[in-house]
Image (cartoon, rainbow, N blue to C red):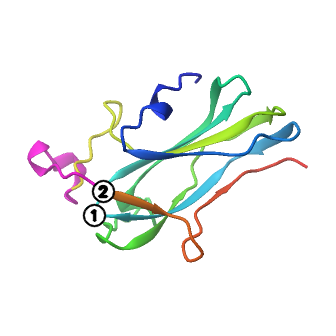
Amino acid sequence: MTDQTAALHLFGAGVVYHSEPFAEATEIAGQVELSVWLALDVPDTDHAANLYEIFPDGSSVLLAFDQLRARYRESFSRERLAVPGAIERYDFARFGWFARRIGKGSRLRLVVQSLNSSQAEKNYGSGKPVAEESGADARVAHIALYHDADHPSLLELPVVH
């Protein structure tokens, strides 16, 4: 929960965002939600989103995380492969519930990355049923994350007032 290795060593497989330091201690309680607009050049990929508190001394603690397979971006009961080149919305809505008082001077770090881990089922990106894919099906995915007026990627925080 305090190891920063994954967040600091993405090797081109993700993006990192930092908030401004909090001007005062702020309570967050509930479930965060993240909507991002992505364009892929393959029909399927796996994505992870991790939210951390970064303390003024630079150390961190993981607050919540979520994972999403592209083919399930609209429904977990119905698959729809991504259209290569199309900019589509991906909603991360299964972050774990947490409550934390973010300290004055702390920042939030959001890491959005392509998931390629020995701890998860391997998705080779071919669009075939993942359980039937092999290394022969492997495709390198190129992923672009958008946030502009037409594609407003957004992290929603349940701030307690």
Q: Residue at x 31, y 71 (%)?
A: 85
Quadrant for residue 129, please give it.
bottom left
The front one of 11 and 49 is 11
Q: Tag 2, which secondary structure?
A: loop
Q: Decide: marks 1, 2 in contact (CB < 8 A)?
A: yes
Q: Could you tell me if residue 118 is visible in this image?
A: yes
Q: Is residue 41 magenta?
A: no
The picture places residue 49, in percent across and down from the top left corner, at: 52, 45
The picture places residue 139, in percent across and down from the top left corner, at: 18, 52
The picture places residue 72, in percent across and down from the top left corner, at: 40, 60
Quadrant for residue 97, please give it.
top right
Q: Amino acid at mark 2?
A: His
Q: Residue at x 67, y 49 (%)?
A: 32
| Mark positioned earlier in the residue sequence (1 or 2) | 1
Q: Amino acid at mark 1?
A: Asp
The kind of secondary structure the magenta stretch mainly shows is loop
Q: Tag 1, which secondary structure?
A: loop
Which residue is identified by label 2?
Answer: 142
Query: Between marks 1 and 2, how big is the CA–CA gap?
Result: 6 Å
**Crowd class of label 2 (few under 14; some 14 to 19; many from 20; radius 10 Å):** some
Left or right, residue 145 beside residue 63: left
Left or right, residue 72 beside residue 92: left
Give the number of the disc on residue 41. 1
Give the vertical position of 90 relative to 10 (above or below). Answer: below
Q: Is residue 129 magenta?
A: yes
| Residue that extends furthest to the left in the rendered view of this protein | 136
Left or right, residue 92 beside residue 156: left
Q: Where is the N terminus found, in terms of image quarters?
A: top right
Residue stretch in magenta: 126-142
